[in-house]
Image: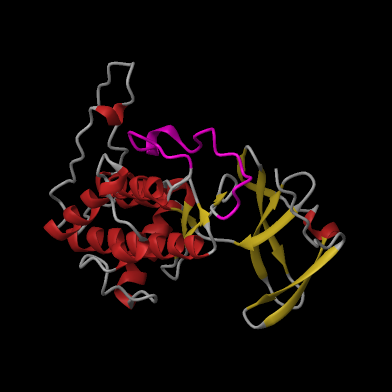
Amino acid sequence: MAEYMLNIPENSTEFNYDGSSVLVHVKQLRKCAKQIGKGYFGEVYSFTIDDPCVIHMAVKNTSILYICMELMATSVATFYQAMHQLPELPPDKLELFVRRCAYNVTRGLDYLKSKNIVHRDIKPVNILINKNGEVKLCDFGICGNLSDTELDFDDFVGTAMYLPPKPEKCAIQDDMWALGITLIEIIEGKHPFDSYKSDGVDPITATWEPKVPTTVSNDARAFILQLLKKEANERPRSYMDIIKHSFICNMTAIPSSDEIDFIRHVINETNK
């Protein structure tokens, strides 16, 4: 197994926030009050620094390492649940949000691929969103480095409900499948396997036939179905192939004001 040596500061660190340099001391991080998440690799807390300016951040504590990150408003899992509870959900708003998630997640995965990294755990709870309409990936605990031949990929990792019928040990096409499942989940307001019957022997995906709800356009359905081909070699060969699809090729990095207004409205609903 390869060894990785990192130069990690022990007592304090300095990072850039909105053009300003911010100093964070480990003693400050030990005062984190509100836990906002917990998983196999550690706990996540919300934290506020008020000197020289007020900064809200997320801090992951692995018991031996503190990782400071941007504090986002909520996960896409929580967001879509609140979105489907709205008295009225205009189809165009739903489709635009699906496009936003598809575009931003694909761009994020393409960036990881450029660094020879595969995420391996794409799902709504690992996709975050803020009030500026920015959608970002999180939870890189089981990422694989595609350029390191010494890494052991004998075990399939990820969340079972988002794994394709024939998982690869470490392939971007598995993340594509997981994105397809995620997008259907956003559209339906629940995981597509929630009410699906299995024989209990073979994985659900062995007999499940991908279907995209008609509440979205033909373009959206075609986009998602390309990600859910049962054979990995039939899915797109690269993330750029996905980005060039007509469903998201005209998306901009910065959301429109109407898009932001809708996202903020739903986020406010999650806080009630």
* In the image: residue 197, left or right of residue 130: left
* In the image: residue 149, left or right of residue 232: right
- Specify start and end residues of the magenta stretch as a single range: 147-169
Label tally: 0
Q: Is residue 106 above or below residue 231?
A: below
* In the image: residue 228, left or right of residue 63: left
Residue 129 falls within the magenta-colored stretch: no
Residue 121, x across and y down, in percent:
48, 45
Query: From this viewpoint, which residue is outermost toward the bottom?
Result: 19
* In the image: residue 237, left or right of residue 34: left
Residue 255, x across and y down, in percent:
36, 74
Which image quadrant: the N terminus? top right
Question: What residue do we see at 23% from left, 31% from top?
Answer: 208
Front residue of 178 and 183: 178
Q: Is residue 242 above or below residue 192?
A: below
Question: What residue do we see at 29% from left, 55% from top?
Answer: 236
Question: What residue do we see at 17% from left, 54% from top?
Answer: 222
Q: Which secondary structure dominates the residues rendered in magenta?
A: loop
